[in-house]
Amino acid sequence: MADHPLDADIRRRITLAGPMPVWQFMQLCLAHPEHGYYVTRDPLGRSGDFVTSPEISQMFGELIGLWAAQVWQQMGAPENIRLVELGPGRGTMMADALRAARVAPEFRKALVVHFVEISPAFQQRQKQILADVGVPVLWHRSFEEVPAGPLILLANEFLDAMPVHQAVKQINGWYERVVEIDGAGHFAFSLGPEPLPLFEQLVPRQLRDAPIGTIYEWRPDAFPLELARRVMREGGAGLIIDYGHVASGDGETLQATGRHTYADVLSTPGEVDLTAHVDFDALSRALETMGVSVHGPLDQGTFLRRLGIEKRAATLKSAIATPEKAKEVEAALARLTAADTTGMGRMFKVIAFSAPKLGVLPGFES
Ligand code: SAH
């Protein structure tokens, strides 16, 4: 696929500068300003590469909207609130959330929506879907651009698209995993030239004696630290939903998906989605460093049930005339909450963080 512009660009960089960290490869594949996966296409929906919770059912966004309204109440109902969403995709979750929030008109009056989105195509879609919601919306390319002020932050399937570093254990330490061009001219995994300094002290305790070849993945803490710093300084809360693990561990979770099936991570850069699990343990440790209260992580199924998804499904079903539509609601409820492999109820986790004075957030009561 050397004729693909991103393939050619990555080759050029490696030829000129040497093997690149997996982290940078992932970053270019997803977010290269011209040829990145998210920049060039809409991968969502049934005919795309993957389906996310808000695309499965309106219930998801509606419950998140009511969650945000409740959090705003707990904040003391400030007159101005920034409702920030990271990576809103088609904007479906926000559209459903704002519709549900009609039951809280004071909240709707107080809010300005801030979308953080790198994809111009998605920005267009978001403009369309939110054209008539009656709430002002602003767009940014990064979270840092969101102006100061109290905020409620939402992110569904955003962090898994943030690039990961990988390190591989060797006899004399941990080496950064890199991408090189092999003898046959293909992209291939390799190791950085020397061990990462002081890395033994950074890996989780249970990995200190890990066998040779063990892979450890991590994301830089800078981003969660920035989110938490904003909430500490300006007030508010954040809700992060993604798939991942609750305990930091070893092993590779970086994977490629295209057209609903697994693909090779290296061979078609920019053509397939690359994701890696969110390490919720590392995430909550980073957030806590800044002094915010961390709530959860919880399974998505538990969280949605506590927010009342079963009742919402029953109401929807009774409002819908046809048996087929009622079956669709049933199927969506199962898909969003089931704990087995057919559902997203257990694989997906929910974590929240807030200014400490807010107390327990909805859904996280013990
Ligand atoms: N939250 C949506 C979409 C998830 S897909 C849903 O649940 O359906 C990931 C989203 O993050 C897309 O909108 C993608 O364009 C955006 N995105 C990916 N990397 C980004 C980055 N570095 N900065 C801002 N947005 C990004």
Image (spheres, rainbow, N blue to C red):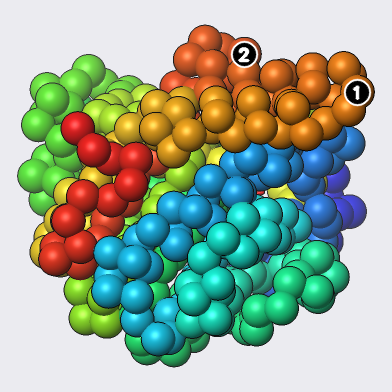
x 60%, y 34%: residue: 312
Q: Is residue 28 left or right of residue 39?
A: left
Q: Position of residue 56 (x, y in %)?
A: 71, 35
Q: Quadrant of the N terminus?
A: top right
Residue located farthest toward the top when viewing the structure as drawn: 340
Q: Nearer the viewer, residue 344 or 80?
A: 80
- Vertically, is 171 above or below 77? above
- Nearest the viewer among 194 and 189 is 189
x%, y% of residue 296? 26, 39
Question: What residue did someone put label 2 on?
Answer: 342
Q: Answer yes or no: is residue 271 visible.
A: yes
What amino acid is labelled 1 in the image? Thr
From the top left corner, tell me how far across and down residue 247 is, in percent: 25, 29
Give residue 37's mark: none
> Distance of mark 2 from mark 1, alpha carbons?
25 Å
Residue 299 vs residue 93: left or right? Answer: left
Q: Which SS class for mark 2?
A: loop
Q: Is residue 134 left or right of residue 25?
A: right
Displayed quadrant of residue 134 = bottom right
Q: Secondary structure at mark 1?
A: loop
Q: Which residue is mark 1?
A: 322
> Looking at the image, do the residues carrying marks 2 and 1 touch, with CB atoms under 8 Å apart?
no
Q: Quadrant of the C terminus?
A: top left
**Label 2 sits on what residue type?**
Thr
